[in-house]
Image (spheres, helix red, strand yellow):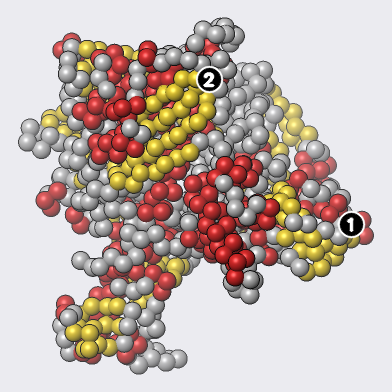
């Protein structure tokens, strides 16, 4: 398919407005990876079963392999690459390093984006709420206890930041 | 020796920041310009010959660059197909959609053959043969009988090839036993080796070098095998693998064996050599599900005891499915659960008969536990049956009989040694720690005492897993560089597949050199820049590579001390290092900076880096007992696992699964990494609880669960795991007293789960997975609807 047969869509990705030619069947994860070079969005199952490709679309956590890019016209997309600012890690990323939240690291971007969504809705989640929120994100390393610790720690860090503002 | 500052601390993961920012480049993240895409045509039949294949139309489709079949690429493709999903052809095209379109244009004429799809049928002599002219059921080729036991050392001095592994006189053992307990038909379902990142690679031959971007557990060996399989010089290949999205052994590549699922390497490698363009070949989840299965065993166990519960005799018969080829070695590891290792304490007579069996299902790869979970399931379930039968506490029967430090490993791996001293155990401490954690003493109840709809159960199992082995073919290398600015780098190809080797090995360098952890860099990403490192499998990374890293760091340190000794005019033995440079021990004022110690340097010369190097050939250093050549220590990964759960006796649904994993790791070099490894117990939980089984359509061999919706892995909601890190210092086989922690976590899980389930409902279910249907059938609440043969 040449570029003429592709459709131009406009996305805001991590704050940058991008105009991208896409084929109608391309998923958002394909476009983020191949069209924008945001390979932090991982593809592992291609059917919404693992959450590795989770990004925020207008602030809501969505597996990017389950939505078509053409349908995201005008949407605000946030990927893992958008979290750290000016070389400073986001508190969730800091918490992940402190608590050894990543083993192989393949699920980490998706887990972290899901966590960002959870904490935006529920800044002080209980353990059961954390488990349920992460229920759609697989970690085949089985590192869940460390991941749950990281989410708890991130919640604390972010609530402190809020207090200081 | 040296002060440990970072060892023993949970320092941050080396390479952790790129993992959490998305900057880490796994193989599929390397987007090479003008990279071609691959799609594979796979066999729709479990057994067939290709009579004719016509690729004319496919090759003519615009955008198609190459169509590969057994006719033009016999190194990668065959005309005989052994399972659904076996390779028929591959198309390389400018876009994946074009390659897919071209697949549909390939015309293939198949001649279908008879096939066999399960272990029980495949064992039968009249079964269709998976490989023509060869029986499906094979005796393990390396059965050795051990004899000529030294009364003092208890080591066996003679090994003789025979019909089984073992020692003593099995018939005499049972004749003399007070109690004999036997359980047949303990079946562990054929299960998929899990990995987050599907297998694949990107290959680019640039006219000079073949750069292979992929995941890896052992870069150098995979590179050599690939070069050999491709028929090119090893010097032409650079194997690049900075990150691997988990593997657990299942993604271990071996391109020389066509039955190991590393075909992507050959397809992309041959295509890029032909086309001189980058070629990407990655598997979809559905393709990944056709690769690398294992488990799939049936075990019969018979154990003889004295009245007091002392285990004297064990007979173990083990059949293991290997699908349509692949790694046939895991079954031998099942004997680790027997009197050969785990119950070596009191056993006098041991026999283990090992068989591996081919079927027309998906090729096997060893993964987490590599045969040990299967053996442990059979033996540890039978030990539980024995405990109930004899009225002995299940914890106590294990404490009485389990291996202890200094007991004899009688050759679970007789290829490399006859018998050896188990370097450390601590299983009894792990049993105590776990039992205390769940208050076993007060809370354990016999199933007969339980009432009500919801029944709670408590189960226990112990395990011993390989942790590296001494002998030829077990080695690793490392370089350590110290720079004039007081930083250092470990140069090592040791793979970090999530298990933490990059972090732990860097910690070793930091502490040997007396430098802060964050001043130690790592060069690890490809074969061109690193010396050989051992395959990270069998939980041997810390054990085998640890010596090499330690040795290289010591070598670099000694060289720097020698340079400083000359300048300071003080003997090197009186000097030491820290982050400020080199100083006299006990007199920090008498010092010299790294830069000054290295001397003058510039564009044209001078010392720019001091390079230490070490080749660790196992056994090394203190690996021999009292320095005696024929008396070696062999390390083990070992521990105990407890599971508690609730069973709804009306629905058969199990809930509230709690796993308590206790392991003695000698010295925990990084406690959080060690704890993280223990969380891998969940892989057994999904095999037990989440209906993991290789379900194929009996009519056509198609996998019915080729995705993560139908074949489930544990989420954060399926169970909780509590890791108990037990540290018993004194393992002599490692310079830092560490042993191993990795694959072990999954080894006892099926057994402890089975034992907890029995403890809850009072009925033993012999076949995994433990589905509600099986539970209700066992309770007599529903009829067994499975068709009888």
**Local SS, label 1:** loop
Q: Is residue B506 above or below residue A114?
A: below
Horizontal arrangement in the rendering, residue B465 relative to residue A160 (left or right): left
**Does residue B163 appear in this view?**
no
Q: Which chain does the numbered disc 2 sit on?
A: B
Horizontal arrangement in the rendering, residue B782 relative to residue A58 (left or right): left
* Residue at x-position 29% and y-position 28%: B441
Q: Is residue B233 above or below residue B291?
A: below
In this view, which residue lies farthest toward the front? Answer: A163
CA separation in Å, label 1 and label 2: 55 Å
* Residue at x-position 27% and y-position 36%: B432
**Local SS, label 2:** strand
* Residue at x-position 82% and y-position 62%: A11
Q: Which mark is residue A6?
A: 1
**x, y percent for residue B754:** 42, 23
For the N terminus of chain B, give its image quadrant.
bottom left
In this view, which residue lies farthest toward the right? Answer: A4
């Amino acid at each position: 398919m040449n570029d003429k047969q592709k459709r131009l869509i406009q996305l805001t990705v991590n704050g940058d407005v991008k105009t991208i030619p896409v084929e109608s069947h391309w998923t958002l994860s394909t476009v983020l990876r191949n069209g924008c070079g945001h390979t932090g969005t991982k593809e592992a199952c291609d059917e919404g079963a693992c959450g590795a490709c989770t990004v925020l679309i207008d602030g809501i956590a969505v597996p990017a392999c389950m939505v078509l890019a053409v349908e995201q016209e005008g949407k605000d997309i946030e990927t893992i690459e958008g979290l750290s600012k000016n070389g400073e890690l986001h508190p969730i990323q800091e918490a992940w390093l402190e608590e050894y939240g990543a083993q192989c690291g393949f699920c980490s971007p998706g887990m972290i984006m899901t966590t960002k969504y959870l904490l935006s809705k529920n800044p002080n989640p209980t353990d059961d709420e954390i488990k349920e929120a992460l229920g759609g994100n697989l970690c085949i390393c089985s590192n869940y206890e460390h991941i749950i610790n990281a989410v708890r720690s991130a919640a604390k860090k972010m609530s402190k930041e809020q207090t200081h503002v | 020796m040296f002060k440990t500052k970072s060892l023993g601390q949970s320092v941050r993961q080396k390479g952790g920041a790129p993992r959490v920012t998305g900057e880490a480049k796994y193989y599929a993240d390397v987007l090479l310009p003008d990279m071609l895409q691959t799609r594979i045509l796979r066999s729709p039949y479990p057994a067939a010959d290709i009579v004719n294949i016509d690729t004319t139309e496919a090759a003519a489709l615009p955008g198609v660059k190459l169509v590969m079949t057994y006719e033009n690429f016999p190194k990668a493709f065959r005309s005989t197909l052994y399972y659904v999903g076996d390779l028929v052809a591959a198309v390389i095209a400018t876009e994946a959609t074009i390659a897919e379109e071209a697949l549909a244009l390939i015309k293939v004429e198949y001649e279908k053959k008879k096939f066999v799809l399960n272990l029980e049928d495949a064992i039968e002599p009249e079964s269709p043969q998976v490989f023509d002219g060869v029986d499906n059921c094979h005796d393990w080729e390396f059965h050795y009988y051990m004899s000529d036991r030294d009364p003092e050392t208890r080591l066996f001095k003679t090994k003789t090839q025979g019909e089984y592994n073992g020692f003593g006189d099995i018939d005499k053992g049972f004749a003399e036993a007070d109690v004999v307990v036997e359980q047949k038909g303990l079946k562990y379902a054929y299960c998929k080796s899990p990995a987050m990142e599907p297998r694949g690679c990107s290959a680019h031959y640039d006219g000079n070098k073949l750069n292979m971007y992929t995941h890896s557990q052992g870069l150098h060996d995979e590179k050599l095998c690939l070069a050999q399989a491709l028929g090119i010089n090893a010097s032409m290949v650079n194997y690049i693998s900075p990150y691997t999205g988990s593997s657990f052994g299942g993604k271990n590549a071996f391109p020389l064996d066509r039955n190991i699922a590393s075909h992507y390497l050959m397809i992309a490698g041959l295509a890029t050599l032909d086309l001189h363009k980058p070629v990407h070949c990655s598997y979809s989840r559905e393709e990944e599900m056709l690769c690398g299965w294992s488990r799939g065993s049936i075990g019969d166990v018979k154990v003889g005891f004295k009245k007091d519960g002392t285990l004297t005799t064990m007979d173990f018969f083990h059949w293991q499915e290997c699908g349509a080829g692949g790694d046939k070695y895991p079954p031998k590891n099942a004997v680790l659960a027997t009197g050969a290792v785990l119950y070596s304490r009191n056993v006098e007579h041991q026999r283990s008969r090992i068989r591996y069996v081919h079927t027309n299902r998906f090729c096997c790869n060893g993964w987490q536990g590599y045969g040990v979970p299967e053996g442990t399931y059979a033996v540890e379930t039978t030990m539980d049956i024995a405990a109930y039968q004899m009225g002995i506490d299940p914890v106590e029967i294990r404490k009485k009989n389990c291996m202890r430090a200094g007991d004899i490993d009688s050759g679970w791996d007789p290829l490399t040694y006859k018998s050896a001293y188990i370097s450390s155990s601590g299983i009894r401490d792990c049993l105590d720690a776990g039992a205390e954690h769940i208050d076993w003493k007060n809370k354990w109840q016999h199933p007969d005492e339980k009432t009500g709809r919801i029944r709670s159960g408590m189960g226990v199992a112990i395990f011993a897993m390989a942790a590296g082995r001494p002998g030829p073919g077990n080695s690793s290398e490392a370089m350590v560089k110290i720079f004039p600015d007081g930083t250092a780098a470990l140069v090592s190809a040791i793979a970090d597949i999530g298990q933490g080797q990059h972090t732990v090995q860097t910690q070793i360098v930091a502490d040997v050199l007396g430098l802060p952890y964050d001043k130690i860099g790592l060069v690890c990403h490809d074969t061109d820049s690193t010396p050989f490192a051992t395959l990270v499998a069998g939980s041997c990374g810390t054990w085998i590579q640890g010596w090499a890293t330690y040795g290289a760091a010591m070598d670099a340190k000694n060289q720097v001390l020698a340079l400083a000794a000359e300048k300071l005019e003080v003997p090197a033995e009186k000097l030491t290092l820290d982050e400020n440079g080199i100083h006299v021990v006990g007199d920090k004022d008498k010092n010299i900076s790294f830069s000054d110690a290295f001397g003058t340097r510039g564009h044209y010369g001078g010392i720019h880096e001091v390079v230490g190097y070490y080749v660790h050939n196992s056994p090394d250093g203190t690996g021999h007992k009292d320095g005696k050549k024929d008396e070696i220590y062999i390390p083990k990964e070992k521990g105990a696992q407890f599971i508690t759960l609730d069973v709804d006796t009306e629905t058969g649904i199990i809930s509230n699964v709690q796993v308590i994993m206790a392991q003695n790791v000698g010295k925990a070099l990084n406690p959080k990494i060690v704890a993280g490894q223990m969380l891998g117990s969940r892989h057994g939980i999904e095999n037990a609880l989440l209906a993991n089984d290789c379900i194929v359509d009996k009519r056509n061999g198609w996998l019915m669960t080729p995705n993560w919706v139908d074949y489930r892995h544990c989420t954060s909601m399926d169970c909780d795991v509590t890791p108990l890190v037990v540290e018993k210092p004194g393992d002599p086989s490692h310079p830092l007293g560490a042993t191993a922690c990795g694959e072990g976590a999954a080894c006892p899980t099926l057994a402890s789960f089975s034992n907890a389930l029995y403890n809850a409902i009072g009925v033993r279910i012999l076949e995994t997975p433990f589905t509600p249907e099986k539970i209700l059938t066992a309770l007599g609440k529903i009829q067994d609807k499975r068709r009888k043969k």
